[in-house]
Image (tube, rainbow, N blue to C red):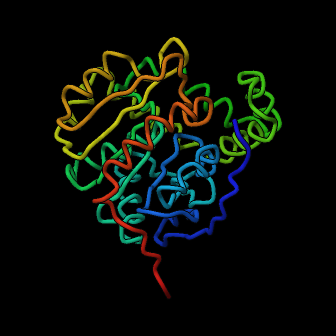
């Protein structure tokens, strides 16, 4: 994993009952909204920011319950996150957004798009699991265990699991998960189990915006089954899937060059129709 980005950024808080913290990086071209996964935060995108700023103006978002955003005791289901995403897009004047979403962030983007099927200029979905149910119980339980640790304990865990990571990267990831509101994980766990066996792709197959699913391998700790990736590309009219062989769940961190090689050309292909950033005044 690389160090923090060299590109300067400014923090903007989107107001509301649950304030949403965002960071805008200096760049050129249309805005690109980056949505992190469960128990993470906007700075997880650090390894890819500098490469993106040559083509886009990246906007990282701390989801509710994460990072510097508001952390209510409850309210961590998809409709809650979709409402926040709508507020962020409205705040920055992004009628035709480009979006990259990792894991939970990709699911939020997809379920947001299911209600606005042609609004996104394009979406990159990074290793977002396209099924729910009991098979994910262990993943949620592991996140809950890490959430209960001290940052030092969680950092040691990540260095053991990811020996290629630099110590600061492990400390950053540890801060993210230990500072996440616990009910983020609890509520999404119960929601996933409640949807065991549901055809989740069927719920989003009306999306007509261009969508690229970039995924790894289940055998390498990715979360997308190949059959689901194939189904995604087949059932959504403007969707494609790209596999990174041997890729794990954190493609933009541990396989960032391969991730960027797939994501940037796709996003640039659709950049002409995408919205430019408008920063509110006053």
13 with respect to 135 (left or right): right
Give the vertical position of 274 relative to 209 (above or below).
Answer: below
Residue at image position (49%, 72%) is: 15
* Residue 275 place in picture, x, y as percent: 34, 65
Residue at image position (36%, 16%) is: 226
Give the camera-side residue of 266 and 185: 266
* Residue 279 place in picture, x, y as percent: 47, 76
Give the camera-side residue of 216 and 156: 216
Residue at image position (31%, 51%) is: 270
Q: Quadrant of residue 21?
A: bottom right
* Residue 10 place in picture, x, y as percent: 62, 69
Residue at image position (33%, 28%) is: 241
**Would residue 21 be visible to someone looking at this image?**
no
Residue at the extreme bottom = 282
* Residue 113 place in picture, x, y as percent: 27, 48
230 with respect to 151 (left or right): left
Give the vertical position of 206 relative to 60 (above or below).
Answer: above
147 with respect to 252 (left or right): right
Quadrant of the drawing holding the N terminus: top right
């Amino acid at each position: 994993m690389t160090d923090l980005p060299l590109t300067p950024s400014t923090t903007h808080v989107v107001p509301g009952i649950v304030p949403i913290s965002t960071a805008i990086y200096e760049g050129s071209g249309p805005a690109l909204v980056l949505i992190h996964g469960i128990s993470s935060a906007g700075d997880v995108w650090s390894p890819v920011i500098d490469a993106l700023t040559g083509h886009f103006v990246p906007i990282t978002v701390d989801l509710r319950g994460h990072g510097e955003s508001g952390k209510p005791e409850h309210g961590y289901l998809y409709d809650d996150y979709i409402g926040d995403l709508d507020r962020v897009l409205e705040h920055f004047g992004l009628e035709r957004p480009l979006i990259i979403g990792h894991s939970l962030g990709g699911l939020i983007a997809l379920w947001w798009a299911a209600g606005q099927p042609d609004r996104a200029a394009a979406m990159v979905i990074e290793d977002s699991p396209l099924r729910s149910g009991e098979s994910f119980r262990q993943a949620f339980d592991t996140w809950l265990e890490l959430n209960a640790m001290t940052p030092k304990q969680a950092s040691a865990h990540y260095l053991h699991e990811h020996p290629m990571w630099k110590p600061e990267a492990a400390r950053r990831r540890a801060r993210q998960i230990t500072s996440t509101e616990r009910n983020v994980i609890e509520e999404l766990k119960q929601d996933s189990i409640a949807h065991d066996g549901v055809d989740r792709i069927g719920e989003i197959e009306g999306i007509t915006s261009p969508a690229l699913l970039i995924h790894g391998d289940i055998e390498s700790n990715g979360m997308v089954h190949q059959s689901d990736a194939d189904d995604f590309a087949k059932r959504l009219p403007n969707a494609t899937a790209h596999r990174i062989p041997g890729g794990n769940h954190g493609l933009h961190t541990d396989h960032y060059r391969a991730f960027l090689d797939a994501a940037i050309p796709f996003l640039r292909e659709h950049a002409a129709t995408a919205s430019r950033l408008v920063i509110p005044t006053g």
